[in-house]
């Protein structure tokens, strides 16, 4: 950042473009702060010129001053994705004083006289090739010094890719052949809104939250669901649950453990697992769905950093890279057959309905669970010894993206495990994969989409193929349908009409401005740039939001 994020800032030379954009989206006569230069037209900070990512802009004076207070008191979480040179050690906290040095190069440096600065890193993946070794990191900054991330990564010997200020001229020139600009992207800004929750859909499955309504009027920061209940984390770290008691909606048995300190909640079909700030895990819900973790309790008292759930079991990654599993042995809860491979080096765990697939630091993949559904990957084992960077599951298969953009699939052929029909399109350039119960959709670098698997589950996108040749930035699935967001904010849907594959009833609302889509088993909800929500699909699964429509016209920031 050319200006400390923790201090009032000026937008610099890009201000006029940003002002024109925001005023085009929201007329200044309705939102006067967007034309108030003294209040920076609502913007609270800036991005370093070579980087990219989110900017925080307030549309009202009330929101502006509230956000300024949160920014100055360091209550706003700032998270970046950064590509660095070399192999970075997993999970590293960088504490090094940073000072801005004036002069011809206008740069920062780590100096004893600098200001206290902290960057917390998490290793996402690694890759090595003819251009050398690289590490993809998630970095959260506790302070916001000028160029902090770039200075800190260079300080530990792993500078960011394509950085003209903090790498040598030769390195910068070589990097420009790989990346047109500095590979530093602000992917997440988390701040306190009013934090209220609105629910709709089947009352028996969490659509009616009236029993806990007073607890959901403010302060909620995250919501997670099972197949019949929800759990909400509040800003104070407490958890509120509602919905089917048999699916985790009743957490009274562990209530004293959920009053504070919870930082993440994950669900199976019928149970929840919550990670606390001290790295311990609390579980509740049906025992056969992972709600009882007593068999592995001594392993869950500290050090857990991620939890992932299948239909009926959980897998937890610990800070030392080991994995702990529990729940139904038929659904991946028993990892004894691969236990020696799960003692260290695990950086990510993905699941389908019955199995788990874990990526290790070296890019190899370990699988376990139901053999017929991808729990055994021996048929493609030689392709999974290195280079895996992302894995996605359908109900009974997996698809892995490798560092070269190629895709490897395994599991039930009828559920996407066999991609031979589109194999020539999956040899390179794939950047994201999404799954339904029986199919996959892959986004390529050029924004096109490739689909395979069961046609009735969205594996056949021929009806909308002309709309999927470019510009797609996100794909989301229900059990048997897909919805794709394009760069212009429009949405394309395909698959089972009854499960969200047909969006014709709301088509005029999906031609522009959509920024996020979320799916239940049979319906979709789209958040638009103005904070409104559009729903379609089965009414029983949330496709009809008419009863709460007045509450969904603005201000929505997340749908689960």
Image: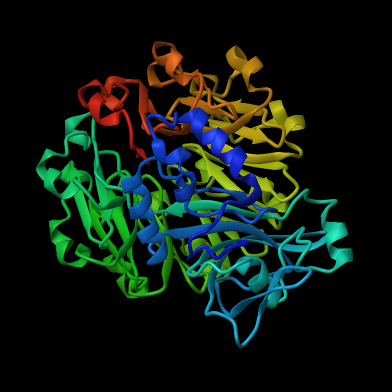
In the image, residue 459 lies at what x, y percent? 57, 24
Q: Observer-nearest residue: 483 or 146?
A: 146
Question: In the picture provided, is 385 more to the left or to the right than 93?
Answer: right
Q: Observer-nearest residue: 357 or 512?
A: 512
Position above or below: 139 against 241: below
Question: In the picture provided, is 252 more to the left or to the right than 121?
Answer: left
Position above or below: 516 against 168: above
Q: How many marks?
A: 0
Residue 411 seen from this side: no
In the image, residue 199 lies at what x, y percent? 23, 35
Q: Quadrant of the N terminus?
A: bottom right
Question: In the picture provided, is 185 more to the left or to the right than 75?
Answer: right
In the image, residue 44 lies at what x, y percent? 47, 53
**Quarter-wise, where is residue 479 in the image?**
top left
Q: Residue furthest bottom?
A: 112
In percent of the image, x 33 and y 54: which residue is there? 66
Residue 401 seen from this side: yes
In percent of the image, x 35 and y 53: which residue is there? 65
Colouring rule applied to residues: rainbow
Q: Observer-nearest residue: 345 or 59?
A: 59
**Quarter-wise, where is residue 134 in the image?**
bottom right
In the image, residue 307 lies at what x, y percent? 41, 58
Q: Quadrant of the C terminus?
A: top left
């Amino acid at each position: 950042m050319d200006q400390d994020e923790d201090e009032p800032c000026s937008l610099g030379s890009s201000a006029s473009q940003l002002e024109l954009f925001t005023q085009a989206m929201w007329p200044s006569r309705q939102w006067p702060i967007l034309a108030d230069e003294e209040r920076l037209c609502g913007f609270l900070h800036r991005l370093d010129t070579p980087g990219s990512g989110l900017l925080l802009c307030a549309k009202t004076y009330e929101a502006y001053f509230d956000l300024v207070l949160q920014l100055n008191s360091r209550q706003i979480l700032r998270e970046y994705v950064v590509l660095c040179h070399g192999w970075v050690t997993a999970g590293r906290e960088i504490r090094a004083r940073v000072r801005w040095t004036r002069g011809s190069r206008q740069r920062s440096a780590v100096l004893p006289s600098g200001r206290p600065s902290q960057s917390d890193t998490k290793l996402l993946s690694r890759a090595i090739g003819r251009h050398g070794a690289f590490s993809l990191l998630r970095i959260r900054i506790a302070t916001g010094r000028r160029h902090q991330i770039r200075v800190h990564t260079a300080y530990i010997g792993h500078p960011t890719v394509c950085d003209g200020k903090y790498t040598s001229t030769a390195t910068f020139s070589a990097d420009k052949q790989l990346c047109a600009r500095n590979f530093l992207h602000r992917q997440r800004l988390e701040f306190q809104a009013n934090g209220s929750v609105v629910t709709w859909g089947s009352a028996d499955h969490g659509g009616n939250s009236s029993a806990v309504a007073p607890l959901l009027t403010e302060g909620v920061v995250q919501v997670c669901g099972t197949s019949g209940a929800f759990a909400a984390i509040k800003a104070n770290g407490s958890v509120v649950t509602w919905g089917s008691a048999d699916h985790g909606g009743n957490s009274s048995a562990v209530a004293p453990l959920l009053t504070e300190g919870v930082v993440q909640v994950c669900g199976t079909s019928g149970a929840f697992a919550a990670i606390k700030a001290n790295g311990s895990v609390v579980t509740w819900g049906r025992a056969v769905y992972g709600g009882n973790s007593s068999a592995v309790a001594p392993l869950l008292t500290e050090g857990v950093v991620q939890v992932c759930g299948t239909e009926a079991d959980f897998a937890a990654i610990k800070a030392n890279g080991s994995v702990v599993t529990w729940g139904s042995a038929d659904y991946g809860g028993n990892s004894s057959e691969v236990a020696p491979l799960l003692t260290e080096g695990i950086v990510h765990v993905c699941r389908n309905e019955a199995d788990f697939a874990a990526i290790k630091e070296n890019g190899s993949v370990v699988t376990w669970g139901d053999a017929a559904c991808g729990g055994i990957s021996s048929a493609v084992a030689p392709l999974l010894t290195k280079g895996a960077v992302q894995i996605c599951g359908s109900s009974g298969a997996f698809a892995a993206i490798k560092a070269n953009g190629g895709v490897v699939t395994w599991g039930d052929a009828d559920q996407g495990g066999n991609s031979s029909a589109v194999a020539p399109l999956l040899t390179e350039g794939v950047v994201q994969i999404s799954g339904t119960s029986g199919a996959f959709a892959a986004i390529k670098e050029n924004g096109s989409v490739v689909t395979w698997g069961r046609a009735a589950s969205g594996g056949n996108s021929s009806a909308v193929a002309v709309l999927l040749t470019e510009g797609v930035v996100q794909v989301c699935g229900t059990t048997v349908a897909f919805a794709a967001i394009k760069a212009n904010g429009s949405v394309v849907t395909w698959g089972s009409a009854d499960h969200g594959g047909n969006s014709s009833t709301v088509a005029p609302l999906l031609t522009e401005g959509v920024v996020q889509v979320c799916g239940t088993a049979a319906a979709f909800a789209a958040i638009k740039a103005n904070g409104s929500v559009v729903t379609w699909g089965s009414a029983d699964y949330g496709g009809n939001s008419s009863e709460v429509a007045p509450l969904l016209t603005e201000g929505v920031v997340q749908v689960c």
